[in-house]
Image (cartoon, rainbow, N blue to C red):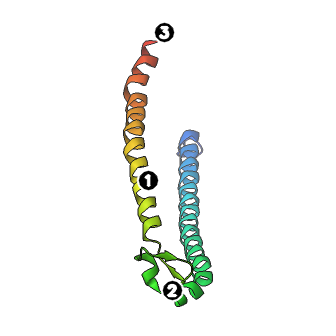
Amino acid sequence: MSQGTAKRVAPTSLVVASRQRRLISGDRLFRAIAYVAAALIIVVAVIFVIALFIPALPAIMKFGLGFFVSRTWDPVRAQFGALPAIYGTLVTSAIALVIAFPIGMGAALFLAADARMSLLRGP
């Protein structure tokens, strides 16, 4: 082949191919980092459960699982129940959600719709 008949590759196609390879390798790297982060979250959660369960084991052995459903709190007779505290926690959390959810949704809707329109219109 002579030099004049050789097919030349446009430099832009080489740049595009190189960029695609970088994007694919970047995607693979991001996917690997995301999987490691997800696995790390699970490992940390398991460690938390173990770290809470091991010190609580003597109390569970002494008072039993009835501790969670009993209402009695009598330190003199060593009878303890956590049901009122658990119930109070659940009720206050529900009240907080009832108050916070509409406020949060209203703020989100305002920012997504009304605020954007007022910003587009200008002052």
The total number of labels drawn is 3
Residue lying farthest to the bottom in this orientation = 61
User: Looking at the image, is 91 positioned above or below residue 35?
Assistant: above
For mark 3, what is the residue? 123
* Alpha carbons under labels 2 and 3: distance apart: 67 Å
Q: Residues within 10 Å of mark 2 (few under 14, many from 20)?
A: some
* x and y percentages locating residue 31 in the rendered image: 53, 61
* x and y percentages locating residue 111 in the rendered image: 43, 29
Q: Earlier in the sequence, mark 3 or mark 1?
A: 1
Q: Residues within 10 Å of mark 1 (few under 14, many from 20)?
A: few
Callout 2, which amino acid? Phe
Judge from the rendering whether residue 106 lies leftward or rightward of residue 45; answer left or right: left
For mark 1, what is the residue? 92
Callout 3, which amino acid? Pro
Q: Earlier in the sequence, mark 2 or mark 3?
A: 2
* x and y percentages locating residue 10 in the rendered image: 55, 40
Along the line of sight, which residue is nearer the eye, 102 or 23?
A: 102
User: Looking at the image, is 17 positioned above or below residue 115?
Assistant: below
Q: Determine if residue 8 is in view.
A: no
Callout 1, which amino acid? Thr
Residue lying farthest to the front in this orientation = 76
User: Looking at the image, is 98 positioned above or below residue 83?
Assistant: above
Residue for point 40% across, 42% down = 99
